[in-house]
Amino acid sequence: MRTVRLSWGAAGLVAGLVGLGVAHGTSHYLGRRLTPFDAIAELVIDLTPGSVTHFIIERFGSADKAFLGLMVFLIALAFFWGAGRLAANGWWAPLPLFVALGGFGALAALTREGATTSDALPSVVGTVAWIVGLSLLTDPVDRAVAEGTAGGARPPEGPAFADLDDPTRRTVLLRTALVVSVGVGTAVLGPIVGKGRRRVEQARRLLNLPATRPRLPAGVRLPGDRIAPWMTQNRDFYVIDSSFQKPAIDPARWSLRIHGMVEREVVLSYQDLLDKEVTEDWITLNCVSNPIGGDLIGNAWWSGVRIAPLLAEAGVLPGADAVLQTSEDGWTCGTPLAALTDDRQAMIAFGMNGEPLPIEHGFPARVIVPGLYGFVSATKWVVSLEVTRFDRFEAFWTQRGWDEQAPLRISSRVDVPAEGDDVPAGEVRIGGVAWAQHTGIRQVEYAVDGGPWRRADVGGVAQHPDGTPNRDTWVQWSATVDLEEGDHEVRVRAIGEDGTVQSGVERDVLPSGATGWHTRRFSAG
Ligand SMILES: Nc1nc2c(c(=O)[nH]1)N[C@H]1C(S)=C(S)[C@@H](COP(=O)(O)O)O[C@H]1N2
Ligand SMILES: [Mo]
């Protein structure tokens, strides 16, 4: 029979998880955006070099945060286990680990944007719960050893369960149950009674916005399934940002400040924003980190207020060429002033596909600028627009090795057939999407098995509110090809309204967006 041991390491894990649960519950109760765990993860994001981030985004896409969370969690588990093992020498022995992890959590929380001293509280409370939990679990065994009822000395891996006398065993089990209930209870109750994200979700659901429901424009959809839908549903829209926990902002507390090189500062409350003239349009947003063939792109119906008149109200001073945008969580980006003042539909958006912006996508308000990558334009949870000059600041991603101004690259993707698909030989329908926002797509071409480029059918374009053609969205493309049995490949390239032909040179997403032709390999039989 295997000996069941009261392992110090396992006791350490239980106590550590309880500490984590208590820290989690406390920060939710206090309505903090970040638990100590989240704060550590975000600090890691801040300190990670751009090349590593880009590798992770390329590998994991919108699941990058899950990957990071798992890494931080595994490291925390190692600390918990280690503390348990050290506790074999006395409750004080793991002190350096308590201080290191608890202190790191507090420090991470304190260095986040807009942090106050109370942000350290969840780490402190969690660490105390960890220490108390661990000594509660190990102390009965300590005493049993001292009283000689645990069958000899205190073994480093923990005493065998069978060697303990009944009262000690009972105490251990009872205490485990108690400690675990406190951890789980706090973790579950904190968010319920607290004033964090749940409240904001409620406020969001109750909003009645001056936004209309999207109506799919005629002709934008080509026949044939499995091409990405022309309109991307909110739940399918990619999520990319540097925040480990999304800011949950009560609209009643939100305001946007337009300042810097302006004649007069403008401050808008959420209600002020809704009271302005509303504009709505279809705009495709994509990420500079989108690899060739990737899905960090989506097309939505945005409702908001145009930025140009807001800047005019503030009165931009001569010499300015940029707007430095800042989000509630301290992310920044630099946008060319001209893209916000020309006649495009650059807006402070409050609605996405006819609904209040989802929290993930920037509730209560974000910026959307047609024709620019997200990292230089599309600030979620936006709170400040500072009119300035590019030579006076360096924004978040530029500090991490990306270009200061990365003009959007024309690109295209094959959606059908899927990579490695088996399709019946004969007539095969192929298709996908192509984009060159604010320039427009003139033509899409495909080549089968390295043959000549041929023209594909291209879906219709939407119209702006004023009736002019909308070049700010992607288009669908498709074609029917005749294929013999065997292996095949199809590739695609787009040609812009300005005559630019999508480059076949394969270039990485860093520092200014990927280039190359997307190719799909499949077989017909
Ligand atoms: N506050 C904030 N806004 C942000 C970012 C961010 O990290 N923080 N990332 C930007 C980037 S790189 C992109 S591609 C878009 C993505 O917007 P989405 O998540 O709504 O698709 O948001 C932009 N806005
Ligand atoms: Mo991005």
Image: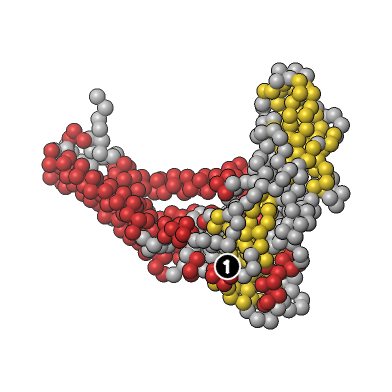
Check disc 1 and report its element: helix, strand or loop: helix
- Looking at the image, is 408 positioned above or below residue 452? below
Residue at 80%, 29% in the rendered image: 448
Can residue 197 be spotted in the picture?
Answer: no
Depth check: 377 or 219 in front?
219
The residue at the far bottom in this view is 263
* Quadrant in the picture for the C terminus: top right
Residue 93 in the image, given as x and y percentages of width and height:
30, 53
Tell me: is circle 1 under 8 Å from ligand 1. Answer: no
Can residue 462 be spotted in the picture?
Answer: yes
- Looking at the image, is 484 positioned above or below residue 8? above
Quadrant of res 406: bottom right
Amino acid carrying label 1: it is Leu
Residue at 39%, 58% in the rendered image: 28
Task: Decide if residue 61 is on the left or right side of residue 200.
Answer: right
Residue at 65%, 41% in the rendered image: 229
Q: How many marks?
A: 1
Label 1 neighbourhood size at 10 Å, few (<14), some (14-19), many (20+)?
Answer: some
Q: Which residue is mark 1?
A: 274
Quadrant of res 362: bottom right
